[in-house]
Amino acid sequence: MTTAPLPDPEPGLLLRLTGPLQSWGLHSHFNERDTAAFPTRSGVIGMLASAFGRHRDQPIDDLTTLNLTVRTDRPGVLLRDLHTVGGGLSGKETVTTAEGKKRPGDTGTLLTHRYYLADAAFTVALTIPRATAEDHALLERCAQALRTPRWSLHLGRRSCPPEGPVLVGQSDDTLHHLIHLPLAARPTRNRNRNRNRNQQQDEDGAAVEFLADRPLTHLPAPAHMVSTTHEDGTRPSSELNDQPLSYHPSRRGYRARPLYRRTLLLPHSQFAGFGARQLDALGHYRETRLHTPEGSRR
């Protein structure tokens, strides 16, 4: 039986999005501030724009050419935070209504619910297939902006800073490394002390979800990682309204785009745990594979 050839390598950037809290709003309006279960295109592109120091009224057409693929290392826990706004203020200082009027004192206090992902971790690839010289230059500028951001970076909302440097590295075979980078998580299945049982679990691997804005057939997944019981990413699972057109305060706009999901079975040895242990594994991978010809499929 012949094995299908893997997709061509794609240049791009690898990002590590992890922190105490993240919030990637999708349908946030007024008193309800939701979060998606993963980083959105609008949130990640907005983070890039912040790294460049772009104002909200400046164009983002170059950044929207980047393709987004997300690996869910840890989905985190949904957290709801209750806020009050406008309480204890005089009539002139209370929250303004949609009609431009002020609320009377007995209705001046508003309750808002804000949702976050607590203790979540994602690895993100920003890629450009069939990249031109101009595309490579854009990737280099993005990498430099993330290394030395003009403005502070945040994981969705401004109250959600990342726990450390966001940029993992730059590669000509980005999606290969997205699959093989150490995960910021423990294996989802308990290991048995029996050696043969461990070997079988390593062969099967643990299910890890990938999400993207295009069919996930572009993932260069080896045959042994392909799951036959999960979504294969060939068709969209849903649609998200998170493709940014403008961040202008008075003309903010988005359009819908498809969401693709695919699950791969990654080996238990790739799960590096938390904290210093995972950072050490990530650093070792960067030195021995990400920045060396031997670590790529080329």
Image: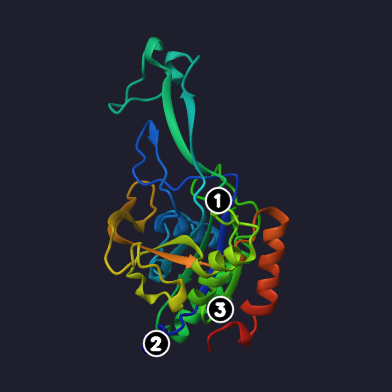
Residue 270 in sight = no
Residue 154: image x %, image y %? 55, 50
Q: Quadrant of the rendered structure where residue 66 is?
A: bottom left
What residue is rendered at 36% in x and 47% in y?
26
Which of the two residues, 94 or 171, is positioned nearer the viewer here?
171
Does 207 sit above or below residue 7?
above
Amino acid type shown at disc 3: Ser
Q: Tags 1 and 2 in contact by the CB under 8 Å rule?
A: no
Secondary structure category for the residue under label 2:
loop
Tag count: 3
Amino acid type shown at disc 1: His
Distance, label 2 to label 3, CA atoms, is 20 Å
Q: Residues within 10 Å of mark 3 (few under 14, many from 20)?
A: many
Amino acid type shown at disc 2: Pro
Q: Quadrant of the N terminus?
A: bottom left
Task: Please give the label number shown on residue 256.
Answer: none
Does 103 sit above or below residue 221?
above
Secondary structure category for the residue under label 1:
loop
Residue 253: image x %, image y %? 31, 53
What residue is rendered at 37% in x and 85% in y?
4
Residue 83: image x %, image y %? 48, 27
- Depth-wise, is mark 3 or mark 1 nearer the camera? 3
Left or right of residue 178: residue 169: right
What residue is rendered at 27% in x and 66% in y?
235
Mark earlier in primary sequence (2, 3) = 2
Q: Residues within 10 Å of mark 1 (few under 14, many from 20)?
A: many
Task: Please give the label number shown on residue 154.
Answer: 1
Residue under numbered circle 3: 171
Mark earlier in primary sequence (1, 2) = 2
Task: Please give the label number shown on residue 5.
Answer: 2
Distance, label 3 to label 1, CA atoms, is 23 Å
